[in-house]
Image: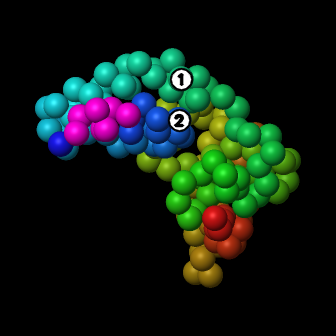
Amino acid sequence: MDISAIKKRYENMPIDELVTFLATYNKDDFMPEVQQVIEEVLLERQDEIDSYKQQEPNEDIESGGDPSSDSGLISRKIKCKDCDYQGLVEAYDTQDYPKKQIFKLLGKDNQGYIYLRCPNCRTDISYSPFELIKFK
């Protein structure tokens, strides 16, 4: 095992991926040597992590998300259809974000439409799943 390569991986990880990793990080899943390296890097990057969590969502986000900054197929970024407020879809890793950025996930219907509540105007809005899918 190359500890220096592991350290470099976490040092160079984009901040959005690092914050997502941190939300699910369980030190017991890693060997002690790797755990120590990860925790050192997290400590070194703590200011960057805190800053990222406090920032407002990107103002250039369209309703389908920003493909250049989200990882995965489904976008986490969203824009209210009524008031144009921009934020993130509620999920397991958004608990540390300011509530004013989180669109509450209300559920979905039989046709697959996803219902969210805008944190700004408090309107319940339906989105086709295709509006949330992005392509790289």
Residue 32: which quarter of the image? top left
**Helix or strand or loop: what does disc 2 sit on?**
helix
Q: CA distance from mark 2 to mark 1?
A: 7 Å
Residue shown at the point (49%, 43%) measured from the top left: 17
Q: Is residue 46 above or below residue 61?
A: above
Circle 2/circle 1 CB separation < 8 Å = yes
What stretch of residues is rendered in magenta?
2-8
Residue on which disc 2 sits: 15
Q: Which residue is situated farthest in the left direction here?
A: 32
The location of residue 19, given as percent across then percent down, is 47, 36
Q: Residue at x 38, y 26 (%)?
A: 42
Residue 31 vs residue 22: left or right?
Answer: left
At 60% from the left edge and 51% from the top edge, which residue is drawn?
Answer: 70
Magenta region includes residue 86: no
**Which residue is under mark 1?**
48
Which callout, 2 or 1, points at the residue further toward the start of the chain? 2
Label 1: element kind? helix
Q: Measured along the vertical axis of the image, is residue 64 above or below residue 17?
A: below
115 sits left or right of 40 in the view: right
- Residue lying furthest bottom in this view? 111
For badge 1, the amino acid type reads Glu
Q: Position of residue 53 (x, y in %)?
A: 56, 30
**In this rendering, position of residue 59 left or right of residue 51:** right
How many marks overall? 2
Asked whether 97 or 134 is in front, the reply is 134
